[in-house]
Amino acid sequence: MTDQELDIWEKENSFVSYRSVVNQANNEWHNLKSTQELNSFLYNYRDVLTLKDSLLTPHIDIKIYQSIVNREGIYKTYGYINKIIGDYIVTGKIDLYNKLCTIKHIDGEKDIHNLEKQGLKVFKYINSDNNTSARTNGSCSTQISAEYFYNQTNCRNDRKLMLYGRSYVFASPAGDFYQSRAQFKMVPVLRRGTFCNWDGYSTLMAYKNVSFTISGWGLENGVEVLKPYFVEIPDYTGTLDEYTIVKDIEYGDKINARARTTAYAFTSFHAEGTSRGIDNNWVVLDCQ
């Protein structure tokens, strides 16, 4: 569904998603006028986002999950209640809802073991390792990024275009199968407002030569095996202004839920992106 379709669906179902809360925060962000307003804003949204390098960063940054969970990171499906907590999804039967609501963080195997003893299932859907490279080659991980900074004034109207690659795992609503996925994202931002905050905006964008290799589970004669996959994304040149571009790709096969399933690091990744806002310079995201 497009953002417009999601907005309509939420209104029809009286549902406010995590995505909508993040959008609301972004709308308020560039109108802050004082340090007091800034501190109040960060406090009110502390459960949803954090300020990282002067840019608002959601705690849940996978779009498919942002669209189905509420502000508390919870979604209900087929007799199960699920909650995203950090890098994990915790799942239990509906009657364990109150218990699920009390869980605020997960810190290692001891916490996981204690939760599982209480009838909850804990699944790590992303890995938190990170590698950032700006227009240079770098080692691959489950999260990679690059940016181009177009510095016009060292404050207002400065522009950036950021590219991201991320691997993760999508858990089926009942937690009975997992599907490996990867996300390529382009985010344009500019500086504006009293504090010259970085803020999302709409602009023309294009990308080319996007491809990656990564490991994932596949079925061979009914047997689950870990094997390499190669994925290419067709080149794209936009004709309308866009706030962000997200390409979310399934790869591999759906496999039975098991503890060994995890998000795997890219073994190679290459992408090139540009926008009108950075004067049509190209950002290169590359790892190997």
Image (cartoon, helix red, strand yellow):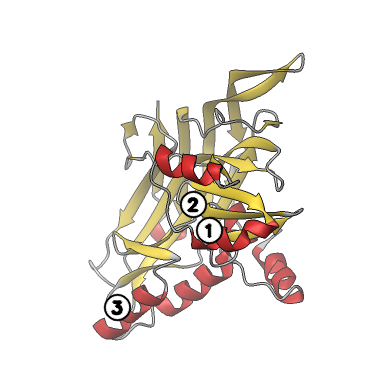
Does 286 sit left or right of 122 as displayed?
Answer: left
Element class at badge 2: strand
Q: Residue at x 43, y 67 (%)?
A: 47
Question: Is label 3 or label 1 in front?
Answer: 3
Residue displayed at 61% across by 45% down? 248
| Place of residue 126 in the rendered image (x, y in percent of width and height, measured from the top left) | 49, 41
Q: Amino acid at mark 3?
A: Asn
**Residue placed farthest to the front in the image?**
117
Foreground of the two, 93 or 33:
93
Residue named by callout 3: 39
Q: Which residue is at a point 68% across and 61% down the rendered structure image? A: 2
Q: Quadrant of residue 188?
A: bottom left
Outermost residue toward the left in this view: 154
For badge 1, the amino acid type reads Thr
Q: Quadrant where the C terminus lies? A: top left
Quarter assignment of residue 18: bottom right
Q: How many marks?
A: 3
Q: Which residue is mark 2?
A: 186
Report if the CB atoms under discs 3 and 1 are less than 8 Å apart.
no
Compared across the picture, whether 142 is left or right of 193 comes to right
Numbered badge on residue 194: none
Residue holding disc 1? 244
Residue 184 seen in render? no
Q: CA distance from mark 2 to mark 1?
A: 6 Å
Q: Which tag, 3 or 1, sits closer to the chain's start?
A: 3
Three-letter residue code for mark 2: Met
Compute the Cα span from label 3 to label 2.
28 Å
> How packed is label 3: few (under 14 Cα within 10 Å), some, or many (20 or more)?
few
Of mark 3 and mark 2, the one earlier in the sequence is: 3
